[in-house]
Amino acid sequence: MTQLHLPEGLQITGEIKPGFEQILTQDALTLVVKLSRHFESRRQELLAMRVGRAKRMDAGERPDFLAETAHIRSGDWAIAPIPKALECRRVEITGPVERKMIINALNSGADSYMTDFEDSNTPNWDNQISGQINLRDAVRRTISLEQNGKSYQLNDKIATLVVRPRGWHLDEKHVLVDGKRVSGGIFDFALFMFHNAKEQIARGAGPFFYLPKMESHLEARLWNDIFVMTQSELGLPQGTIKATVLIETIVAAFEMDEILYELREHSSGLNAGRWDYIFSCIKKFKNDGDFCLADRAKVTMTAPFMRSYALLLLKTCHKRHAPAIGGMAALIPIKNDPEKNEIAMAGVRNDKARDANDGYDGGWVAHPGLVDLAMTEFKKVLGDAPNQISKQRPDIEVTANDLLNFQPETPITEAGLRYNINVGIHYLGAWLAGNGCVPIHNLMEDAATAEISRSQVWQWIRSVKGVLEDGRKITADMVKAMIVEELVKVKQSVGDGATYDRAAKIFEEMSTSSDFAEFLTLPLYEEI
């Protein structure tokens, strides 16, 4: 086994496979230790604040724009200028830090590629460190792969690389500093920065990031302070790091200006992370007797609360000269059914056309086969312009009530309930087997979409409004019976695997138990 030289106070319990020592170097780990010691207590304080706020919202508190930061919202300020490499982001493709995926995504024709240590990736030890190796090779353009008789390598022209580390709630359980687990996000970020930042700058880009799951501007401030210290440690000019924040919690939607302000030297805008956002709404209002959303398929970007959120994000970004990036169209090409495929493609076209016409600077796709289609819709509006940040939207007025106008409430159907159960089992089973990004029923599912499925089922059981359109009340017993039936269907489509039996059991526990788990990935992570 390869011996590592570890800084004092750091312990690694994960297996050190050949090549891992190139990432887990003493100097890189020293940066992890330094950042952990300096910032871990703040992370824990912020996580405790989340818990406190969740309790208050469970008791009936409603979010609102913050009185104490009104001067920031009304102030005349802008973020620092965007670097050339991030000016044009009409189509961004996303996917896990898997070697073939990285090559295909960089070659896809998209303007940028968000490579993901978070929701589309199972964060087991092997995936996290292999992912770092893959990205080191990608940055240096040495990445290649021979697989199943095919050869994969980078084209001359590739997408701009943007990295998403894990959110604040996730630990890295295989790395301890002074006996405590380190933050998964700090670990992912520090290793990538140490090995690649200077190389990226030398190649005309830079260390660019996506920051997930934030719930307040104080959480953005923590990231900003980490950026400042890291740049100082690595001898980089302040403001070199640029980060786009995903607005994917209902509480962060009330602090968009403040989040941009905290990161203003390091900001590259905001993204409308729609799937996590829907999950966040269900989670935060799970005990509210008035709150109950219809079938997942009916909650689209045209739903009142989603429309308000998307327009407010756009207005806020452009007012601050920041890019506004639209969310994910989860639809993917359907190879063997031209009719269904055309319906799916029309859905993607409509989604991107709406974003482009509203004023968005770009949007996300989950599959290389959608890049051209999405690009066409943005080019229709943008022409040759790299973005439309100059398109200000003073006409948009969004109130707190608009953000909280949770419609539609109906229909809730047996098909919709079964769909949630089926997707939940299928996705969790794949995740436990090491794959965090799974095509299911012609949609690309990741942790965010699976979260909607299980939280919706949990809430329907408990809400007086959780009634099927045929008049039957959704109950835990009904769900348990359907889980048995849907497990059979999942196995018919994917084969018999032990992880799917375990997934069905987990889905049952998480959707019918009296307690609501904050994130399904937290208990799952302890099993991998």
Image (cartoon, grey):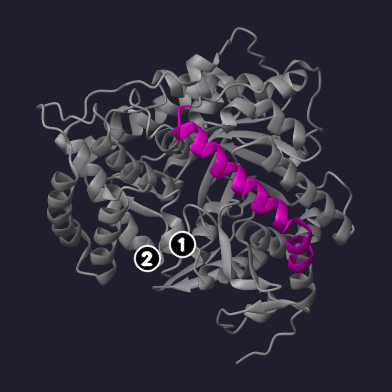
**Separation of disc 2 and disc 1 at Cα?**
8 Å
Q: Residue at x 66, y 74 (%)?
A: 179
Q: Which mark is residue 432?
A: 2
Question: Eyeballing the image, is 370 above or below 202?
Answer: above
Magenta span: 32-60
Residue under the image location 70 percent in, 39 percent down: 218
**Residue drawn at the location 19% of the way across and 45% of the way down:** 476
Q: Position of residue 21 (x, y in %)?
A: 67, 81
Residue 147's mark? none
Q: Viewed as shown, does residue 474 lie left or right of 323?
A: left
Residue at 58 percent across and 61 percent down: it is 171
Give coordinates of residue 426: x percent, y percent: 28, 56
Classify residue 286 by image quadrant.
top left
The quadrant where residue 170 appears: bottom right
Residue at which label 1 appears? 122
Horizontal placement of 147 versus 19: left or right? left
Image x and y of residue 361, in percent: 61, 28
* Contact check, label 2 and label 1, Cβ < 8 Å: yes
Query: Which amino acid type is marked by label 1?
Result: Thr
Q: Is residue 260 above or below residue 111?
A: above
Q: Main secondary structure of the magenta part?
A: helix
Q: Label 2 neighbourhood size at 10 Å, few (<14), some (14-19), many (20+)?
A: many
Which corner quadrant holds the C terminus?
bottom left
Q: Would residue 110 be visible to someone looking at this image?
A: no
Looking at the picture, how far across and down is residue 152, in whole percent?
Answer: 51, 65
Q: Is residue 521 left or right of residue 207?
A: left
- Assign the N terminus to one quadrant of the image: bottom right
Secondary structure beneath dot 1 equals: loop
